[in-house]
Image: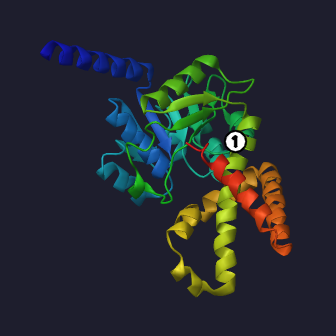
Amino acid sequence: MKFVIYTAWACIHKYWRVIIRNVDFRNITIVGVGLIGGSLALALKKSGYKGKITGVGRNRNNLVKAKERGIIDEFSTVHARGVQDADLVVIAASVGQFESIAKKIKSGLKQGAIVTDVGSVKSAVIKNVEPFMPEGVFFVASHPIAGKESSGIDGADGDLFNNARCIVTPGPRTDRKALNKIKSLWKAVGMKVVNMSPEEHDLVFATVSHMPHVVAYALVNSIIDADKKLLRFGGGGLRDFTRIALSPEQLWSDVCSQNGDDILKTLNRFHASLSKMIKLFEKSDWKGLEGEFRKAREARTLIE
């Protein structure tokens, strides 16, 4: 029995050593040490990463807090200085800031460095970041699908990425070796990695993520436009449905500005579906309404 347990432990240990060895970045810089950036740092350390993690951002107090909690090892409020030794730079800010960040880090990036991101929009991000990568520096766009309604370093969680998906979106200029290293990075923190084109990614997530956020905000606003006091009577159903409306408004305003065309397409489809139900109400067609509910209920089971 002891031999079996030892053998199992040896296999698990060997497996994790292989994964961590594939994450061959001695120095990692995370630009934007908030929920996702902080969680990535914690997840890497939890999975056995022994290199140095540097945090970069504008808010020195936030960076001091991150260091005190052991999330990062060093920090800088000067972007170019903070990335100087980095083998890997992870841009973990709001997507609206990516172009500005790319310009700020450009002069500090060393030859052979890889830059990736965590944004939920990909076509615009590639367009805004890739042109600022110096010769010999490689950009790989990625989107870890994980998060919470809360934002900021206080929500950082080393288990945030466990069993979640990460989408990588290579383009024509993406270096294949760099792509494989980024895949290994996300696998090392427990994620399942999926390849998509940037265009496919943006349409998919406009449909299943961006549009639902807009709808959640609109629903809350429709209630407070009637009477803000009504919200106090909302139960679990309303709380579940509008949970994502607790997400930071600047983050989602940036997402909408970067993926507006695809989001508008999905909002128009939602509008058509809602209009169909309104017409069923106007005709008192309760059987027709029941059919629409049934169709949605059966489809809802497909969500994992």
Which residue: 68% across, 39% down?
129
Q: Which quadrant holds residue 281?
A: bottom right
Residue at the front extreme of this rendering: 287
Secondary structure of the residue carrying tag 1 is helix
Number of marks = 1
Of the pair 140 and 210, the residue shown nearer to us: 210
Of the pair 265 and 289, the residue shown nearer to us: 289
Of the pair 3 and 259, the residue shown nearer to us: 3
Which residue: 63% across, 73% down?
220
Q: How many residues crowd mark 1 within 10 Å: few (<14), some (14–19), many (20+)? A: many
Q: Which quadrant holds residue 229?
A: bottom right
Q: Is residue 203 left or right of residue 279?
A: left
Q: Position of residue 272 (x, y in %)?
A: 84, 59
The amino acid pointed to by label 1 is Val
Q: How is the image coloured?
A: rainbow
Q: Is residue 271 left or right of residue 120?
A: right
Report the quarter where the C terminus lies: top right
Which residue: 67% across, 70% down?
219
Q: Position of residue 196 (x, y in %)?
A: 69, 30
Vertical arrangement, residue 147 with respect to residue 182, above or below: below
Q: Is residue 158 left or right of residue 286?
A: left
Report the quarter where the N terminus lies: top left
Which residue: 80% across, 59% down?
273
Residue at the left extreme of this rendering: 2
Q: Position of residue 25 (x, y in %)?
A: 44, 25
- Camera sees residue 33: no
- Camera sees residue 298: yes
Vertical arrangement, residue 60 with respect to residue 231, above or below: above
Residue at numbered disc 1: 125
Of the pair 116 and 227, the residue shown nearer to us: 227
Q: Position of residue 44 (x, y in %)?
A: 39, 35
Vertical arrangement, residue 283 with respect to residue 112, above or below: below
